[in-house]
Image: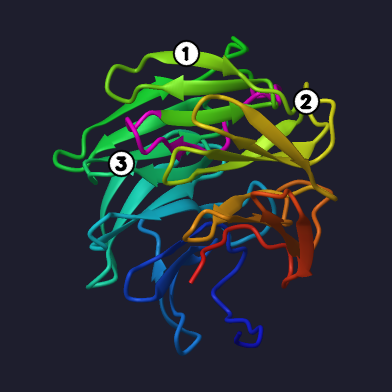
Amino acid sequence: MRDLGSVEVGTAPYGMALGGDGTAWVATAEGVAAVDTGTRERTALIPYETGTGPVTTGEYRGGGMGIALSPDGRHVYVGVNVPHENGVLEVIDTRTREVVRTVPAGIRPFDVDVSGDGREVYVTNHDSYDVTVVDTATWDARAIVVDPYDTGRSLGSWRKPHYTAVRPSDGALLLPFEGERLAVVDPRTGRVRTERMTADTHQHGVTAGADGTLFVVGTGPTGSGDEGPSLTVRGPDGGERVVPLDGAHEDVTLSADGRTAYVSGGFTRAGHWNGISVVDVASGEVTRLPVGDRPLGMVVL
């Protein structure tokens, strides 16, 4: 195992995606950083085409948030937050390392995901309660409202969408809410239905394993959720195990074999801790590791 190290990527890094060539793409307040994970050097900082105001830190700062790669590795898709306005999806050519297109999105694009065939990009917009569906052939965009509590898309509500997982079996979009409801979105028809969840905690990060198992991060008793931080492991049949965690967490990623879940401690609000929780999926055993300063996005090399 290599020693821990760090690379300066830019102010307030958020999401991260890993290319097949070992390049990590990191969304920051200043631009998208390209990092050679072999040499541990930043090789580029690509500025956003969209104006985002002064470079700042904090939950509401402007700049890149969610980020993803096309399946062929040719494009980086980054959701860019524009304070007090709708955000955008910026498309970066990974060879020229330049922004080649911008597409309108919603307010505070927390997450960006891509369909398995690369034909669509999904931008999860926290404050506008919607997912922007972008056709990568035409670059047309449409919004699907995801408001399972019928809040009227109130800015004062805690019951907003945060992160999305694409279900491998059918391409459905899965968005957890409050450890109570899972919104299941058909991106083709725009139909939204809900399924029951059991963790009873405010939920953020989510990812799906190759077999369809869903992993959902509970951040603690914020909003309507009453229970503490946790990791929900939800099987393809809807059965759930809830693994308690110590302290607020934000996002989750998996090992290649799906046996280990890594949960970042850098919660976007108060209550974070500077490390990750490593969860053995089979046993539920949790190991806490100190890692850097307020870790958010993660990739497994």
Whichever of labels 2 and 1 marks the residue nearer the N terminus, that label is 1
Q: Is residue 170 magenta?
A: yes
Would residue 105 appear left or right of 203 to someone viewing this image?
A: left
Separation (CA) of disc 2 from disc 1: 21 Å
* CA neighbours of label 2 inside 10 A, class few (<14), some (14 to 19), many (20+): some
Closest to the observer, 132 or 47:
132
Q: Secondary structure at mark 1?
A: strand
Would residue 227 appear left or right of 123 to someone viewing this image?
A: right
Q: Amino acid at mark 3?
A: Ser
Cβ atoms under marks 1 and 3 closer than 8 Å: no
* Residue located farthest toward the front when viewing the structure as drawn: 283
Would residue 250 appear left or right of 209 to someone viewing this image?
A: right
Is residue 32 visible to the viewer in this orientation of the structure?
A: no
Separation (CA) of disc 2 from disc 3: 30 Å
Cβ atoms under marks 2 and 1 closer than 8 Å: no
Residue 82: x and y in percent read 50, 45
* Quadrant where the N terminus is found in the figure: bottom right
Residue found 62% across the figure and 12% down from its top: 149
**Residue at label 1?**
193
Q: Which mark is residue 223?
A: 2
Q: Which residues are magenta?
A: 155-172
Q: Amino acid at mark 1?
A: Arg
**Residue at label 3?**
115
